[in-house]
Amino acid sequence: MSIYTTDSPHFVRRAAVGVLAGLAAMTLVGCGEEKAPAGPSTKAASPSSSGQSVEPAGESARLAAQWIAQELVDGSHAESEYDGSVFADNGLTIDAMWALVAAGEPALAQKAADWLALRDNAIDYAGDGEQAAYPSAMGKLALAYLTPGLKVEPEYKSAEELATSLIGRLKPEGRFRDISEWGDNSTPAGQAFDIMLLVRLGQLDGLSVDPVAALMAISCDDGSYPSMFDAEQPCTGDVDTTAIVAQALFAAGQDAAAEEAFTYLLQAQTEPGRWQNSGADSVNSTGLAVSTLSLWESAEAKSAVKLGVKALIDWQLPATGAFPGGERGESDLRATVQGVLGLQAVSYLKLLGIQAQ
């Protein structure tokens, strides 16, 4: 799983803010982790918001989608468990919805979209804007409302209204910060989705401060990004966060910074075609890395994507069509929703109709 999939503030605050990083598979890569040798430079290549011409694993994705739909409560939303309690997980619901769209199952995804559009669910996730406001959730929820192929009629705020609220939380240092009695729990991945939303709506230019520059300022020397703001030094990159941030940087027209992140992802791929998190092979990391590298038009990236798709197909559990998560290797919703993005080799930009600046 990933921090940004367990990003319902309602879930996090009940679970205890202090264990946010512990809930994620987007944990930091260990300082001593051995990385694959650096590959050839991709500087001569150019990214494309339409993505590579990679043959997606359509049948594998459809099998996974059927399992995802069965795992959603009433076919509409995901739940997460922490410390013996079960909570509606809006962030994971969005990821499941996007996986269903990517797999070519918009009718199944529409049920999730309808659930996300309900007033109470939206406020619980994004905040009421006064006593609580969660910019990372605002951006992701607004992007969910704008997903091509779905018809969403929000009861609370439209995508444009959520973007306005989001901009209102932009602080002088360039970060979108929470209103919350539990402190600020915004993450680089959340800020990346906020940036994608503002690009999608044409609202990134003209802001009083630059959220893209603030995000770039936390990059590690190798072009990667840590999973948390104000992370301990030395800077330790995280594959999942780097993959999401790279897409936001490319969307915002920061090609050089995006290229550094893409290069990091290329170098982090292991020989079987997988990516790791915390020293262990990770479906989530592999799915997100393939999704991101599908934007990059270089021979190295195309080869990495092809190997990644094959690795995911081999990883898929034949009995369920799902992907395994955790040490026990059982079917896991978080792993499966991100695995589908990799199977289809589709970026968030392509999936959500975001044209890079």
Image: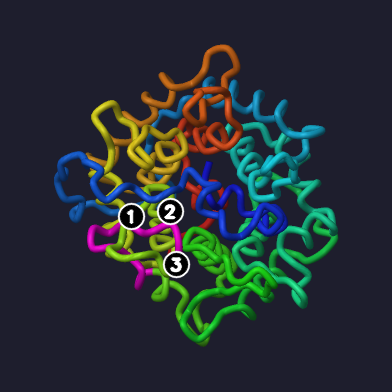
Q: Which mark is residue 81?
A: none
220, 99: nearer the viewer: 220
Q: Earlier in the sequence, mark 2 or mark 3?
A: 3
**Disc 1 target residue:** 237
- When the figure is inspected, residue 304 is found, relative to residue 89, above or below; the finding is above
Residue 247: horizontal and vertical position, in percent?
42, 56
User: Does the residue at mark 3 contact the one at mark 1 (Cβ under 8 Å)?
Assistant: no
Residue 202 magenta = no
| Residue on which disc 2 sits | 241
Image point 70% across, 64% down: which residue? 159
For the residues labelled 2 and 1, say whether their Cβ atoms are less than 8 Å apart: yes
Apparent side of residue 304 relative to residue 325 in the rendered image (left or right): left
Separation of residues labelled 2 and 3 (CA atoms) = 11 Å
- Residue 209, how many percent across, how many down? 48, 84
- Span shown in magenta: 216-228
- Judge the density around disc 2: few (<14), some (14-19), many (≥20) Cα neighbours within 10 Å: many
Residue type at tag 1: Gly
